[in-house]
Image: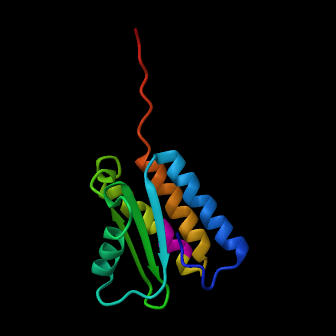
Amino acid sequence: MPRSEGFSASQRYDIDRAIRAAETASRFEFSVYVGSCEGEPRAYAERLHTSLGTPQRSVLIMIDPQRRVLEVVTGSVVRRDLDDDHVKLAVVAMQSALSVGDLVGAIERGLAQLSDAARAPETLHTD
């Protein structure tokens, strides 16, 4: 869930809707943290991720707008379906939106790409 400071009610709604859509599509849990990170960004993001209810089935997007830092942390179960290349593509899409000041759009794009990549492929049974 994103921290609510600095977001309008409409923006919080859009982010919440994007999180729910990502969770529904992938069956994994998604969290977003927007705010200051303490110390080394990757380590801070990993600590946040570890504090989630089910970190092994979770994806955390951490954005520190002041330091211009973006981190994505995935749990061990999630990594079975969501590899590093897919995460890198989502990060590039988010960075593109962030570069023009579209924080909410970056979050929405990242969530959509990550959940789409993490979605289990449909299987066709032929008998």
Q: Residue furthest top?
A: 127
Q: Give yes or no for residue 96 being in the magenta stretch.
A: yes
Q: How is the image coloured?
A: rainbow
Q: Is residue 113 left or right of residue 9?
A: left
Residue 123 on the magenta segment = no
Q: Position of residue 43 (x, y in %)?
A: 27, 79
Q: Position of residue 40 (x, y in %)?
A: 29, 86
Relative to residue 105, is residue 83 depicted above or below? above
Where is residue 56 shown, x and y percent of the image?
Answer: 31, 56
State whether residue 88 is above or below residue 118.
below
Q: Position of residue 65 (x, y in %)?
A: 50, 86
Tell me the quadrant of the picture where the C terminus can be found.
Answer: top left
In the image, what residue occupies the spot 36% across and 54% down? 57
Please tell me which residue is depicted at 48% across the width and 49% down the height of the picture. Answer: 116
Q: Residue most toward the right?
A: 10
The structure residue drawn at horizontal position 30% and vertical position 53%, both measured from the top left corner, is: 79
- Picture mark count: 0
Between residue 38 and residue 85, name the one nearer to us.
Answer: 38
Picture quarter containing residue 59? Answer: bottom left
Relative to 116, 76 lies left or right: left
User: Taking 102 as reference, is 126 above or below it?
Assistant: above
Q: Magenta residues, as a range?
A: 93-97
**What secondary structure characterizes most of the magenta part?**
helix
Q: Nearer the viewer, residue 1 or 66?
A: 1
Q: Residue furthest front?
A: 53
